[in-house]
Image (tube, helix red, strand yellow):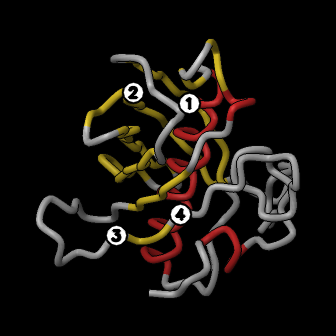
Amino acid sequence: MSDAGLQQRFSPGSTCFGCGPANELGLRIASFEADPDVPGTLPGELVADWQPLPHHVAFDGILNGGIIGTLLDCHSNWVAAIHLMHADGAAGPPGCVTAEMSVRFRRPTPIDAPVRLRAWPVAVDGRKVVVDAELVSGGIVTATCHATFVAVGPDHPAYERW
């Protein structure tokens, strides 16, 4: 596995707040294809570890819900893009955008330790990919996400954004 996350490999100039490597003020998550030999790994799963900082709080010691939503959205979007890239046999991922997303906050997420993001495709219909994701802190799932992403064409600003 490469030391560089998918974002750095395929989109090093991206300024996306959640996953853009070039955004010095962003969250800069780095997603990786999960090792399929690890028990419990789902087909097409991506993982990312991310350390919250004190300014990411909603209140003392607890991660802000908007930050959680951003982490889940960006990481899940990469699942859709990488899935379509592999399905097409392409050299790079297509530009995908979030069409719909719901987040369930299951319990407070502390900021004193890294969180793990897990996401995997659950349905594909042409250029549309539905993804499930979870945010895990200390081995406990603290938030889940169900989202739909669509690969966009040349008439969309996200086309070939990578």
| Front residue of 57 and 83 | 57
Q: What residue is shown at x 80% (from left), y 50% (from top)?
A: 16
Residue behind mark 1: 68
Image location (x, y in percent) of residue 142: 36, 27
Which amino acid is tagged 3? Ala
In primary-sequence order, the first of circles 2 and 1 is 1
Closer to the N terminus: mark 4 or mark 2? 4
| For the residues bearing labels 2 and 1, Cβ distance under 8 angstroms | yes
| Residue with the mark numbered 2 | 143
What residue do we see at 80% from left, 47% from top?
Answer: 26
Which residue is rendered at x = 61% and y = 80% of the image?
A: 4
Say which quarter of the image contains residue 61: top right
Residues tagged 3 and 1 counted as in contact (Cβ below 8 A): no
Which quarter of the figure is the N terminus placed in? bottom left
- Cα distance between the residues tagged 3 and 4: 9 Å
Q: Amino acid at mark 2?
A: Ala
Label 2 sits on a secondary structure element that is strand
Amino acid carrying mark 1 in the image: Ile
Which residue is disc 4 drawn over?
31
